[in-house]
Structures are given as structure tokens and as C-alpha cells.
Amino acid sequence: MRPRAAAADAAFLLALAALALLGLGNTFAGRGYLWTGLAGVAAGALLAFGLRALRQPAIVLAAATVVVFFAAGVPVTRPGDAPSVPAVRALSESAVFGWKDLLTTLPPIDDARLLVVPWTLGLVCGVAGAAMSAALPPRRPRWVALWAAAPLAAPSLLLAAVLLFGTHDPVVPLASGAGFGALALTWAAWRRRRAAAAPAGGVRAGRAAVRALAAAAVLGLAALAGVAAAPVLGGDAGGRWVLRDQVVPPFDIGAYPSPLVGFRKYTKDANQLWDQELFRVEGLPEGVAVRIALLDDYDGSVWGAGSGGDGGYHRVGAAFGPTGDTVLRVTIAPAYAAAGDLNPWLPGAGRAGSIEFGGPRRAALADSLRVNLAAATGLSTARLAAGDTYTVRTAVRGAPDTVALPDNAQPAGRPALTESAQALLASKVAAWTKGTSGLSAQLRAVADYLRTNGAYSDGGPGETQYLPGHSLGRLATFFNAPRPVGDDEQYAAAYALVAGYLGIPSRVVLGARPGPGGVVRGSDVHAWVEVHLADGRWATVPQTAFMPDVTKRPEQRPPQAAENTDAIVVPPPNAAKQNTASTDTSRNDPRRSGGDPAPDPWWRRWWAAIAPVVTWGGPPVLAAALVVAGIVGWKARRRRRRRTRGTPAARYAGGWRELVDAARDAGAAAPAGHTRREEAARLGGDLDALAAAADAAVYGPGEPSPQDAALYWRDVERARRGLVGGRRLRAALSLRSLRPRRTAAKPAARPSATRPATRPAASTPAATRGAS
């Protein structure tokens, strides 16, 4: 392949790849993805053209691609890491799991490790496109068009992959659509023109260039017309189909216990976290509460964080939404880090748009960040530790903390309650809201009743009969008693259920109002309720609206018989969410620490290190090994059959065919239609004697013996090793000898200058038969 043609093919390939990669503009933040992908295309193209010039087989190109992926991938995708074994291991893990992380991370993504995706796509596109464009044109004219269009498969597949990994919103659709199509057709037309015999003279060449430019202009105008007509013609109203919609984020929020279950550790009588510092927040406007966890799903046992619909928790980058004008800096204290139900949650306020971690664990915390955009809350699967800090840029104005319940509240939808919950609430809510109309009035009536007639108890001395928890069984006791008794846990859980019964979606918020200096202690933690309004906002109902004062204690001798105990028989709570229900994982004193777990044995640590590589890299390696074994085994079987089957004369002929096939696999040209002597002359080397021996055995008067055939095969093996030489790997894996040989094309007779170039009559089949 000529250098100028290779350079032109590489330029076309780079341009098409650039247009295709632009489709990831909404997926990644910045333009780093584009340069990374183009670097992969350039590296792959240089590798493929270089190995093609050295006449290396496809298996060598595949192995070299893997080497280039790791050798150049570390500095390209991980510029901060020095080339080392840990860096290569991290790159391999990103290559295996990066696709999943990309699809489960909300765009725009600023995680540099996920640049391995455009790097891999670009490298594969460059290798495949350059390898196909470097192939020699076919001899048969009918295959020229296919040969000219074959390299377009690589950038076309790259464009399809970019669209699948992208978002619903197209990026520069005119360039990536119309421009890509026009440039692709121009490249195919130029390659087809190049494959044909170039006409002599500058006039014809100039006309060819004019025709190419005119064709490109027509294609461009057609593409522009299609883009302009697309809105009029209509299409799929559902938008484009992307993989991001089909992949469920691999994150189970139910694995984290509900922090509302362990609320009593913040109370004074529990004497656990009451007077201990949990965290410190700086920059919080006065009067704004800090939200720790948002609980919007009740399963009959606990209020927990939901994972369905828009309320799911997703991987995000450092910036995941519009940033407000408020900057909060949060510092975690040891007591918060020691509470197992608290340390995953990130305290914050308002609607956060970005979170930036600090300290030595910032990389691990950023990688494990999950955010619920609908609820404006986040957590870290790596869990917060003492001394961790992070900065939140948020918008406080319009946040649920600042929206009060309006007088004419309208619900955003109709929540679904179980029959058990409805039966539990029916008679009580009807009695408490009697004489009121309107949703807001009913909500205020229930809150007034609970605040006025209820009592506060956190299960302290003399009040141990008032148990913690907020399952349906515990709330049945709360509602059916002569007067409700409990703490923030029972009152907030009960009021949220009442709001759902009245027809407005609700959720429980665990949060705090910081004390002096932004310090949050256990005594500052409370639980309140938010309701979803028809305009999309969430209105806050503070705990002071539906809870009695903490000084309002219950009677020391509660009545033996509960009021209306026969009104309902509450079934046992649903155990579908046991991991978040009845166990308070932070009941232990945070100042106590257990012993260090025993280290895993060396073989388990070794297997954990290589398991991802074996799991994901093993199948492709095994498939490649099976292909290689199949090729080598097929050739070995063919060689054995030629050496042992048939008459000794047939074994002589088979030996010569084996010698010719070995030369073909090594790269020699051995077309069909020649005698053995002619083939020996074309292959070179000292093969005349072997060709003569095969002719004598096949056409001679006598029949050679099996011993003679065995000696002939010994000479054939020696000659075969000489023909292959240092190209044994290529010869062993080449497929040329498995395809039928082409007949050598005979040169056409040049017409005479004084006589027309007509075929003599005697050379035609009819004339020949007539002459005979």
C-alpha cells in the first residue's frame, strides 16, 4: 500500500471517528473524551498500517492491540498515575467495569477513569478501520465496491456505540448525521476510484476530481434537506433508544438500615449521642435545617429510602445539577462515623448541585457517591469516617425546608396504602378531622390533635412500656391508646401515614437544626414530614406542628385496657425489608470499638485480585485459544491424512501439496494452473528434485513403495521448515491454505499498431472444434 493512500485513509478514518465521538458530548463533562478517543483511533491506525507493512497476520495484530491498550492507556486515561503494575490493574478493572459505571452514572460525567470507554472504542475503531483499508483490492471487479466500503464499518459501528452509550439529547446532529454520511460516501467513492486503473493525462484526472466534489456537494445538500424536513415528517415521539434506560443501577438502597429505627439514641434518657458532636456545618443560612436522610417508602415495618422511579440513587460526578449560591462545608465527627445507620448518609441542605470531597479519602468517597436527585439527598457506599470533609454547592431558596404548607394544598398524586394501614387509620382520622374540609385543614386538624392530646416519651425510667419502632403493630398501639405516646420516630411515622391516607404523598425526613457554630449534636436531631404538592414542590410540616412538648410526659400508670382495641387486628409487619426494619445497627456506644477482623489467607487475597481479570478476560482469551487450536488442529489433521492415506503415489502428490500450502501460509504466491516444476521455480529454493520425484511417482511406469513415500515426506518436512523460516507463527495461523487457490491471470495480448486486436477464429471453441 502506498504511503499517500495510507495517509488519506487515515485522515478519512480520523475525521469520521471525530464526528462519531462528538455524540458523547452530553455524556462527559469537557472535551477530554474527544481527545482520548481520537488518540485511540490514531494509535490503532498506526499499529494496523505498520503491521500490514510488515506482513503480519491478524493474530499478531490482535495481540499487539492488547499491548498498546495497556501501554498507552495508562498515560492517556490516567495521566496522574505512573506506569506500574497497580496502574495496569486499575486500567483493566476500568475496562471491565467502566461500561457499567458509565451507564449507571448520571451525566455529565467528570470521572477520568471512565475515559477508558472512548479510549477503547477509538482504539478498536482505528485498528479495524485501518486493517480493512490496508487490504489489497480484489481482482474481480464485482467485489471492488464491497472492498471500497468495507472500512466504513469501523466508524459506523463506533457511531452506533456512541449513540447507545449517549443520552437522549443529540449533540451536533447536523455534523454527526449529515456530515458523517457525506464524508463516508466520499471516502468509499474515492477508494473505489483508486482501485480502478488510473487514466493517463491530467484532463481525465481533473474531471474525476470535479465529479468527486460534485458528488460530495449533492450528498451534502441531500443531507441538509433531510435534516430540514425531519421536523415536518415527524418520527418517534419517545426519543432515541439508549442503553442507559435499559440498565438498572446496581445499587440496593434497601441494604442500608433506616436511620429512623435508631432514633432513641439521640434522646437524653438513652445517653448515647445526646451530648456528642455528630458533625459541623459551615455556611448554612440562619433558620435552615440540615437534612441527613430522606425516607419515602413504608413497607409496614419501617420508613426507608425508596429505590424506584425518579427517587433512585445513582452514581454521579462531582457536578450533577445546577449549583446554587450557597456553599456548605461539612466536617464529620467520630460519633457520626461510628453510627452504622448514619455514616453512609451525607448531611446537606437545599438542592445540591455539586459535591467535592476533601482529605485523603476523597477519591474513594467520590467514586462511591450516590445521589437521589428527586430528593436532593446523597450517600456514600464507602461510608463517612471521622475527619472526612466535603463541600456542597446548593440552592437553599425554594428547597422543601423553606416551603410551608399552603392553605389550599393540592396533592401531586394519590399515594397507595396497604389495606392494613387504611383499616388502622380509618376510624381515627375520621374522628380527628370531623367538621373540617379541605386537605390543608384536615392535615392541620390531625397535627393539632396529636400535639394537644399526645405525650412525649423516649422509653426512659418508668416509661419502658413505650417501645421504639414504627411498624404497623407499634403504630396500632400508638393510635389505639387513650392518648398517643412516643417520640419523634412514632409521631413523624404516624403523621406521614395520615397524610398518605388523606390523599397526599408524604415522606419522613431525619435531620437537625445546628447549634452555635454550626455544631450538630444528638440533641439537635429530629424527624419531620414533607408532603408533595401539585406544583412539584415539597412542603415541610415541622415536628413542632404535630408533636407535644418534651415536658409533656405520659401518666406513670397507663390504663390497662387500650381504647378501641377491638377496632382492628393488625397483621404482623411485612418482612420483605428485614435488613432495614427492626434492627438498630448503632445501638452500641460509639466510643466502643471491636477487635480487628482476622486477615484473609493469601490465596483468597490473590484470587480476589485476579478474579475480575479471569471472569471478564477469561472468555475472550479462551475463545481466541479455541480458534487458534482449531486452525492448528485442522492443518495437522490434513497433513496426517496426506501422509498416511491412499496409495504411495497419492502420498507423493499429497506431500507436494503440503509443501505448496506451507509456502502459501508463509506469504508466497502460488496460484493454481501450473505444473510442479513451474511451482518449484516460483517458490524458489532447492525444490526441483522434490517436484521431479513427485512427477515420477505419479506419472512414472512403476508404483513406489510405502518406504519411498515415507522418505519423500521426510524431505518434504525438511523443505517445509526451510520455506517457513522465521515466519512459523504466521504460517501456523494463516488461513490462506484453507481457501482454494486462484488461477493465475494470463496477460492479455497487446494489439498491433497496424492490425486491430481481434482474436483469431481458430482460438474460439467453435473454431477449435472445427479445425479438429
Image (cartoon, helix red, strand yellow):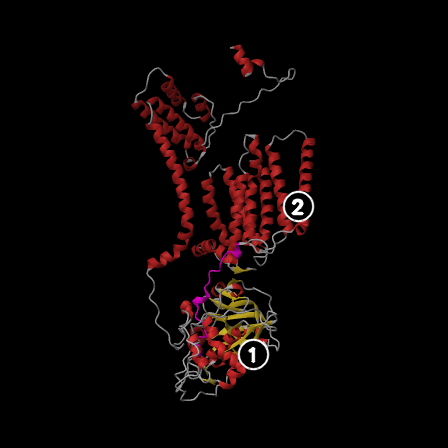
Residue 671 drawn above or below residue 405? above
Q: Residue at x 51, y 81 (%)?
A: 431
Q: What is the C-alpha distance between the residues marked 2 and 1?
A: 61 Å
Name the residue type under label 1.
Answer: Gln
| Residue 292 position in % (x across, y down) | 50, 73
In the displayed structure image, the side of residue 6 where residue 711 appears, left or right: left
Q: Quadrant of residue 184?
A: top right
Residue topped by disc 1: 442
Residue topped by disc 2: 223
Front disc: 2 or 1:
1
Name the residue type under label 2.
Answer: Ala
First in residue order: circle 2 vs circle 1: 2
Magenta span: chief secondary structure? loop
| Residue 2 position in % (x across, y down) | 57, 36
| Residue 194 position in % (x across, y down) | 61, 34
Question: Which stretch did the figure color magenta?
Answer: 243-263
Q: Residue at x 39, y 86 (%)?
A: 560
Residue 366 vs residue 97, the one in the foreground: 97
- Rate crowding at label 1 as few (under 14), some (14 to 19) or many (20 or more) other CA atoms within 10 Å: many
- Rate crowding at label 2 as few (under 14), some (14 to 19) or many (20 or more) other CA atoms within 10 Å: some
